[in-house]
Image: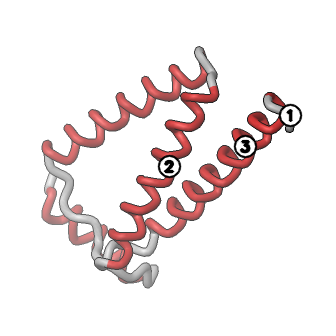
Amino acid sequence: MDRGRDAGRHALAHEGLALGGESTPAFTPTHLFFVALFGVLAVIWALVRVLQPTALHGAIDTVGRGLVSAWMVLALTQGASQVLGVFLVMEVAGMVVQGALLLGARRVAAPA
């Protein structure tokens, strides 16, 4: 596999689609490690949320979505690919919906 040629293709596709920001770099074993690591963590967290759904887990997840969104905004302001904006919109939407559901459940559980 020729990584240099693949990186060139990615750069051309990125520019051809006028995505803005930096093109993706050549994928190395270090990238694969971090993708796999965070993929495993995300799946484990998803299993915890599905198998033991609690308000605390929901609150932690909501805060986590806010932090991830903040990192995405920072990356976008520093020239990351605008494709990241699609993921940002989805993350913020999930945070808002999940936060609203948690607040609604809290109000029902503790009537004034």
Q: Nearer the viewer, residue 23 or 53?
A: 53
Image coordinates for residue 100, horizontal then vertical, percent: 73, 48
Check the image and name the residue furthest to the front: 112
Which is nearer the N-term, disc 2 or disc 1?
Answer: 2
Residue density around tag 2, few if under 14, some if 14–19, many if 20 or more, within 10 Å: many
Q: In this view, does 31 lie above or below 108?
A: below
Q: Which residue is drawn at 35% across and 28% down?
A: 40
Residue at image position (36%, 61%) is: 71
Residue under numbered circle 3: 103
Q: Is mark 2 on a helix, strand or loop?
A: helix
Nearer the observer: mark 3 or 2; the answer is 3
Q: At label 3, which amino acid type do we have? A: Leu
What residue did someone put label 1 on?
Answer: 111
Give the side of residue 66 with respect to residue 27, left or right. Answer: right
Residue furthest to the top in view is 51
Q: Residue at x 43, y 23 (%)?
A: 44
- Residue 9 percent across, percent down from the top left: 28, 69
In front of the other: label 2 or label 1? 1
Q: Which one is closest to the eye, mark 3 or mark 1?
A: 1
Nearer the observer, 21 or 3:
21
Q: Which residue is drawn at 32% across and 37% down?
A: 38
Q: Name the residue under label 2.
A: 65
Mark 1 residue element: loop
Marks 3/2: CA distance? Answer: 16 Å
Q: Which amino acid does label 2 sit on?
A: Arg
Q: In which quarter of the image is residue 56?
A: top right
Front position in the image: 57 or 14? 57
Vertical arrangement, residue 40 with respect to residue 92, above or below: above
Q: Mark 2 to mark 1: distance in Å?
A: 28 Å
Amino acid type for the residue under numbered disc 1:
Pro
Counting residues from the start of the chain, the first of labels 3 and 2 encountered is 2
